[in-house]
Amino acid sequence: MKSIGFPELIVILGVAVLLFGGKKIPEVAKGLGEGIRNFKNALKSEDEKVEEKKQA
C-alpha cells in the first residue's frame, strides 16, 4: 500500500474544510484525538487484564 504524500494530504485537508467549514475543524480534530486516546487506553487496560490472568 502506498503512503499518503503531500499532494494527497492537501486534497484531503481541502475537502475537510469544504465539508466542515473553518470553524468546525478544531472541534472535529479534538474529538478525533479524544477518540484515539480512549481507544489506546482501552487496549492498554485489556493487555493489563490479560497479564494479570496469566500471572494468577
Image: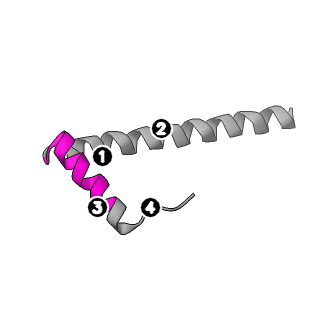
For disc 2, the marked residue is: 38
Label 3: state its secondary structure. Answer: helix
Rendering quarter of residue 10 = bottom left
Q: Earlier in the sequence, mark 2 or mark 1?
A: 1
For disc 3, the marked residue is: 10
Q: Distance between the residues labelled 3 and 1?
A: 16 Å
For disc 4, the marked residue is: 4
Q: Which of marks 1 and 4 is nearer the N terminus?
A: 4
Label 4: state its secondary structure. Answer: loop
Q: Give the range drawn in magenta.
A: 9-22
For disc 1, the marked residue is: 29
Residue appearing at x 30%, y 44% in the figure:
30
As for residue 36 lying within the magenta part, the answer is no
The quadrant of the picture occupied by the N terminus is bottom right
Q: Earlier in the sequence, mark 3 or mark 1?
A: 3
Q: Which amino acid does label 1 sit on?
A: Ala
**Comparing labels 4 and 2, the label whose residue is closer to the camera:** 4
Residue 2 vertical placement versus 54 (above, below): below
Mark 3 is surrounded, within 10 Å at the Cα level, by few (under 14), some (14 to 19) or many (20 or more) other residues, namely few
Mark 1 is surrounded, within 10 Å at the Cα level, by few (under 14), some (14 to 19) or many (20 or more) other residues, namely few
**Comparing labels 2 and 1, the label whose residue is closer to the camera:** 1
Most prominent secondary structure in the magenta stretch?
Answer: helix
Q: Position of residue 47 (x, y in %)?
A: 70, 39
Q: Distance between the residues labelled 2 and 1?
A: 14 Å
**Comparing labels 3 and 1, the label whose residue is closer to the camera:** 3
Q: Where is residue 18 in the image (x, y as percent from the top left)?
A: 17, 45
Q: Which amino acid does label 3 sit on?
A: Ile
Q: Which of marks 4 and 2 is nearer the N terminus?
A: 4
